[in-house]
Image: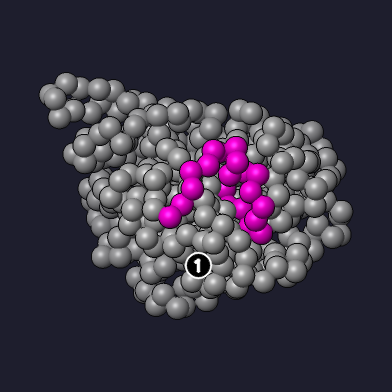
Amino acid sequence: MNPYNMALKQLAIAGKKLNLNEDTLEMLKYPKRVFTVYIPVELVNGKTKVFTGYRVQHNNARGPMKGGIRYHPDVTLDEVTALSIWMTWKCSVVGIPYGGAKGGVVCNPKEMSVNEIERLTRGYTRAISDYIGPMVDIPAPDVNTSSREMAWIMDEYSKAVGYNCPAVVTGKPLNLGGSEGREEATSLGLVYTVQEAVKHKNIDLKDAAIVVQGYGNVGWNAAKIFHDIGSKVIAASDTKGVVYNRQGINPYKLRDYKKKTGTVKGFEGTEAISEEELFELETDIFVPAALENQITKDNAGAMRAKIIAEGANGPTTPEADKILHTNEVLVIPDILANAGGVSVSYFEWVQNLQNYYWAKEEVNTRLKRLMTKAFNNIYEMTRKHGVDMRTAALMYAVDNVCNTMQSRGSLDKK
């Protein structure tokens, strides 16, 4: 499914449950601003290539807009628009004072040199610099971007405004105002929600089986954290293959192997299975941590996980949600499960504005309190309204945004 259509379908479901009027739904469907920029980059071969980039700013009723920047050959404007909408709901679900935004550049960084990526990043920053800022729109890392790219964005933006401005982006290196705990925040937040979810499924995490689809930053950190608390990672995948061992895989050794070879495929002591078989494995926790549209009506019925914790954005289609709910699979939706990243981004932004920095223990304590409260708020809503977790999370988030818009006078009635 087209990601934007998926986001609109989810909004329609939540809107119906909330009895929102058509005018309100119409306002929420569309972003506040959409930018398409063209970035000329001199390549190492001396030729110039023009890359297409996007920045979509969905809603700023609750505060400055917030969202990552992804570099991927399949980036589309519809995808970025959908992600900006999900960011609005994600920030609202965990109660941080942001609206949603998202950025993307159509490129394949795996085929580019470091110098080319830096020129691209700085060019993209210059193209959008008039429309971002600490009180306007605050970018962050996403697929194929990291603290390195955020450092370049912060530096380029600081040059444009004439002073050092660390609060313009989050996910920066520590020596440029980054926050302790940011690198693994998305995964740690996900684990905190799972720790609450297992209470409702009678699962002991110290003996739980874990499957991770996508072994990038979120997937590997989730595997590591689960492993460290005693869970057993039985399978992991990346774009090149799937590895499986029912007795357990050491995530640290798998990470080292992937760094050397570029893939998890062929890791010693594991069996190669297909992507289809990965989704059908009997497991306690399944973590989709890749891209959108991974769990669909075609594979949802065969899934034997008890809990799905969405590390990726938009990995499950609405049709698949219905099947999983019927099969009593507890799905912790992306706008809740992976909100740890934006939550610690918020902490980083607060620290930047105050120029006062917290220890990692304080960051993680605040994150656990925030994620635990958010999970229980949403779970209580599922019980109250008799809906699945995604619908409850969307209802909670959309209602918060509408109430804020109403208080500000930009919405007459819901």
Relative vertical location of residue 191 with respect to residue 49 in this rendering, above or below: below
The answer, for residue 153, to whether it is visible in the render is no
Residue 243: in magenta span:
no
Residue linked to disc 1 = 227
- The residue positioned farthest toward the left in the image shown: 46
The answer, for residue 243, to whether it is visible in the render is yes
Residue in view at x 31 percent, y 51 percent: 259
The image position of residue 276, as x and y in percent, is: 60, 37
| Three-letter code for the amino acid on which mark 1 is drawn | His
- Specify the segment rendered in magenta: 269-290
In this view, the residue in front, 13 or 289, is 289
Residue in view at x 41 percent, y 75 percent: 360
The image position of residue 405, as x and y in percent, is: 68, 48
Left or right of residue 120: residue 322: right
Residue in view at x 37 percent, y 26 percent: 52
In this view, the residue in front, 14 or 260, is 260
Quadrant containing the N terminus in the rendered view:
top right
Left or right of residue 352: residue 330: right
Label 1 residue SS? helix
Residue 273: in magenta span:
yes
Quadrant containing the C terminus in the rendered view:
top right
